Amino acid sequence: MDITEIDVQIQLSAGFAKPEFNIIGLADRAVKESAERIRNALGALNLSLPSKRLTVNLSPADIEKTGSHFDLPILCGILCAMDILPTEEVSRYVIIGEIGLDGAICRTGGVLPASVWANSKGYGIICPGVQGGEARWAGHTNILAPNHVLELINHFRGTQILPLPKTIEITNTEDKIGDLAEVHGQESAKRALEIAAAGGHAMLMIGPPGSGKTMLASRLPTIMPEMTPDEILETSIIYSIAGKLNNQSLITKRPFRSVHHTASSVALAGGGSDAKPGEISLAHNGVLFLDELPEFNRTTLEILRQPMESGKIVISRAKRNATYPAHFQLIAAMNPCPCGHLGNAALSCSRAPRCAEAYQNKISGPLLDRIDLHVDVDAVNPWEMKIKNESPIETSAQIRERVVAARNRQIVRQGYVNALLDGADLDKYVVLNDELTTFLNTAAEKMGMSARGYNRIKRIARTIADLRGSGEIIMSDIAEALSYRPINRGKYGVKRQ
Ligand SMILES: Nc1ncnc2c1ncn2[C@@H]1O[C@H](COP(=O)(O)OP(=O)(O)OP(=O)(O)O)[C@@H](O)[C@H]1O
Ligand SMILES: [Mg+2]
């Protein structure tokens, strides 16, 4: 992620009867409104701007500045120019914070990344009091976190020393997101979910309404490995920028972002006037769940193609580009047709299969191609639900143990998850003997598989072997991988246009 250092320069020019206050350096409306907030905050401190022309320049001047977090650095600059704060000392700090009309320092987005950056450059950080814990998480110990401008002035005058904020305790609160044991039947879908979690593979579920697709997807985080400290920091930084890091708690549970199909491109990818991160970045190191996939706007979905391969998203802005990490695991679900009952003679509508063709064709081929696991999720038979109810069902914790072991094998072997295997690494780590190669080639030929499809089978077979705890891929791994046929070739498949 790019972080740009902005220098606040203050110029006081003498010879003016009335005080003038200008902010320059490509500042947007929110930044320009700073002037009003600062004037009021100074008033609350019983200070008034000197009768001079005050020019604030935010440098470099060719980068657009947006947001209210410039309030505090600008105010500190002015207090330095008025000799109320010591310039030399203050310039050793990165400053971030919004100012209230009464001089209170209010919460703002981006404190965590600012603190990480300040720490790496040897600067201290001044941030809002409520966010001291957030700044502390970056491993920083030179932090001033005042709640009011007066506290900051008193600190530099030596009359009130600001204490080092407390570190955020990581508490692993158990959220009520359910357990896979609550899903009856659906053994093959659960198996696919386990493979997806182990290898980080994208997955698409297709089946009639009420078969448990949403239920299965929402329980994926319960079988994924715990987040590592690095992942916690990366993901929390994104939430910090988005202003979604609440109550001083970090993001310690893998995000599960369920996006509604009416979401706009900006909501999904990020952007807008303040270049905020979108859902795909909020799902970084976690799950992006798109329920009712064909209902999404096609151009919105196409945005996913690039980040799914690169793990990041570039948002173009008028003057510059913002890049956010977007390494998410895509889980999608859909009905085979608008009424959802394609293939069920008793329930399907009279327009089948043409309405299903139109429906499924809303999703582009290249996007489907990027999804490793395609799974049919049929309706559960009531009898099966009853029988399964009586015999014990595996819990998420039991499945997670196998997932974690398989993940560890991948990290030790190649340093990343199997879903990202491609090119030379794919050939290096997925070795097939002559017999397996002939088997796979024959199947590929019969199924008319594309080169990408062929590689998809190899990646999934690798994950299946890892779940078996084996370095060697065997025939049953390939056979199982081949069973996750693309939806258009599976039970609910229709002609693609
Ligand atoms: N396999 C199952 N085991 C236990 N309960 C189930 C199962 N499948 C569905 N249910 C029950 O049905 C409800 C609806 O399931 P869910 O929302 O997951 O279906 P869906 O496949 O996503 O349907 P739709 O296609 O309409 O979105 C669940 O909340 C649950 O109570
Ligand atoms: Mg659903």
Image: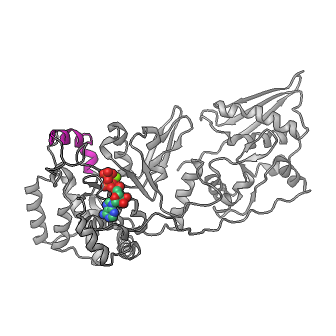
Magenta residues, dominant SS class = helix
Q: Nearer the viewer, residue 34 or 218?
A: 218
Position of 136 relative to 356 (above/below): below
Q: Which residues are magenta?
A: 350-369
Q: Is residue 132 left or right of residue 81?
A: left
Position of 224 relative to 496 (above/below): below
Q: Is residue 487 highlighted in magenta?
A: no
Whether residue 420 is visible, yes or no, is no
Q: Is residue 75 left or right of residue 111?
A: right
Q: Nearer the viewer, residue 392 or 463?
A: 392
Q: Nearer the viewer, residue 481 or 56?
A: 481
Q: Is residue 301 left or right of residue 480?
A: right
Q: Residue at x 18, y 74 (%)?
A: 474
Going by the picture, which residue comes out furthest to the top?
17
Whether residue 148 is visible, yes or no, is yes
The quarter of the displayed image where residue 202 is located = bottom left
Q: Residue at x 60, y 69 (%)?
A: 171
The quarter of the displayed image where residue 301 is located = top left
Q: Percent x, y for residue 37?
A: 77, 35
Q: Percent x, y for residue 120?
A: 63, 58
Q: In this figure, what is the number of numbered marks?
A: 0
Q: Percent x, y for residue 242?
A: 57, 47
